[in-house]
Amino acid sequence: MSDLRFVESAAALMLLSCYSYPMFAYAQATDNPSLPQIVVTASRYEDDVQRVPVYVTQITRQQINESNAQTVNEAIIRLGGISARTSLSGGNEQTLDPMGFGDTAGSNLMILVDGIPMIEGDSTEVRLSGIPVESVERIEIQKSSGGVLYGGGSTAGVINIITRASSRDSDHASYASVYAGIGSSDTSEYRASARYALNGCDASFSALDRQSAGYRVHSANDNQSGSFALKYSMDAIRMGLNVSREDTYAQTPGSLTLAEFTANRRAAQASSLANNTWMEISASKYAGFVETEKADVLWRLDAYTRVRSMDALAVMGGSPVSMQYQGDNSYTALTGQKTMSTSYGQSKLIFGIEHNAWNQDRDYPGSFLGSYVLDFNSTSYFIKNDFDIDNAGVRVSSGYRTEQNYRSQLSHSSSTLIQNQSTQSAWELGVSKAMDAQNTVYARVARSYRFANIDEFTTSYDANYSVMPLLPQTSTDMEMGWKKILGSKGRLDLRVYRNELENEIIYNNFVGYDAYGYALGSNINLDPTRRQGADLDLSYLLTNKIRLSSSVSFRDARFRSGDYAGKQVPLSARELIAARVEFLPDAHQTLGIATNWISRQFVAMDFSNAYAMPAYTSTDLYYVYRLKKFDMSFKINNLFDASHYSYATRSWDDTSTYKYTAVFPDLGRTIWVSARASF
């Protein structure tokens, strides 16, 4: 309650100040629409996308509105060319997996909201479905490792969702909007947002309410969320507060066998249906920042805290198991940015210290699993420098981070304490060269890492059911790329990359049998693996009425040595193609068609490559009509009702004697109609 009172008091003071002080003006390159695209995630400060020696794309608020993207996840998948799969936790959620890490996708991708990392100490995914798209200013996607600036767990890239709570957008107009949509499976969604700007004060509000019976049997879900943000600028200081709340409930239909999927893909797993499995998550978040310039250094202090509870009913060995998780997470960071001019060019130095703490009380009432106290905390120091040699059109980037990580699990029933402590470092060196005003080439080499989360290092067993040490995962990441501005028509980005991984962390559901004859699963370190390939992103205005975009990825994920040398890593498709065509008959209408094709891949935990998931194609059709401050839209997802699944795993039956392929079906054809009014 003390945190909430502090936020309320600070918000009141900031709101009163809006009527008393002039706004502090920040120079922005985005004020001039003819200047190149501006990004943040690559360097933690606003920068020209052509200069940064990493592969970066940006999704703007205008693109989100024109594409009729209903959720943040949908915008990232459709507009950012990021592969994803239906969340196993249910609800209106997608698990993003840009590099084919499968079950550990969430642990290898760093997701930030307003520059603050959303880090879970366990295997829980970061859920984005509760963020109303109207609150998003832009989304920045870095398809390269970000270990120096963002720490462990960013080998597969960084996604920064920038909301109006912290953005330095140049549009200071007040506005309000309401949205309503209905669709298949008795789904309805209502959203509202508003913004008020005056004399350096910027207050915004957003809310979401969504209900659905679910596509599959026993997959009903609902989601409510709301946020209030306040930004204020005066003289040489800028500050902001953001308070949000999210509540999610979802029934979980479970997996199907291949025969069950063929017979009825909308069915629920028999044991999930019989035991009425479900999950419920509630989270309250409080965040604030202060920026000021002292001694020619732009200082920024970020503080964030979240209180989160999760209750669920699952099935284990054919019997229901209740789960009750209650925890909190806090993050604090102090960063400095200094720009220095020399006779050779300009240097931009950024440095900082971060502290992240996460703890959780975990209980399994009525079962033999007992109760636990889980703890995770880390402290990091980092420094990065971008040096621009202006006369040569060259940038040299270099950086280093060190992170000390501590995790522990205390069992109440046995008083057993399992601890894990490790220190890891990341570094990077990159060079970009502007060949002319439209073409830039770059090369980069970096080291990234991730620590085993609490669920992983406490469930790493040998054949005698003894806990084994689980080593941190490391990766040497190399890439080269080309960025081309296609005049006023669009842009093209191309890169080739190779990631050499050591001790990749993954779950294997069979390492032997326990004393009772049941199959024993364990988190393990894999033998050395390699991920390499090429990515291409193209956006192009073919005519004034036809707009094209495409993302193509070719990737090869294999074991470099060991028992499975030469085999492909499971859940990593070799080819992914996303294409979108939009027709603009006039200024009021957009008709779009988007197609995603995913090549075959091997099911989770199939290291011998014996069980493949078939390739599949999904096509969406959408239409948007705009008239002044009103728009309406119509959308058909999976237009041709393709029957497919994007996740499958090798699993045991309730007796651990029969192993089969467990399939989690994707949605069939769904229809959505919506309208939005702005004021």
Image (tube, rainbow, N blue to C red):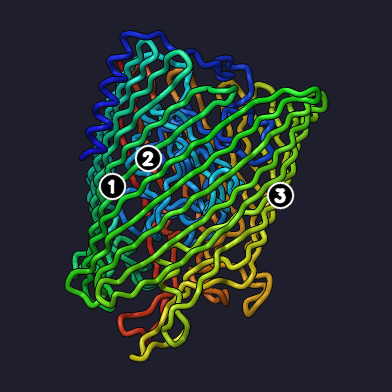
Marks 1 and 2, Cα distance to the nearest angstrom? 10 Å
- Give amino acid for label 2: Tyr
Q: In which quadrant of the rendered image does the C terminus lie?
A: top left
Disc 3 crowd rating (10 Å Cα; few below 14, some 14-19, many 20+) is many
Task: Choose mark 3 or mark 2, whichever is in front.
Answer: 2
- Give amino acid for label 1: Val
Which residue has dot 2 on it? 304
Marks 3 and 2, Cα distance to the nearest angstrom? 32 Å
Q: Which mark is residue 445?
A: 3
Residue nearer the viewer, 584 or 355: 355
Image location of residue 169, percent across then percent down: 47, 21
Q: Which mark is residue 307?
A: 1
Residue under the point 64% across and 31% down: 49
Residue nearer the viewer, 286 or 65: 286
User: Is disc 1 placed on a helix, strand or loop?
Assistant: strand
Residue under the point 51% across and 71% down: 470
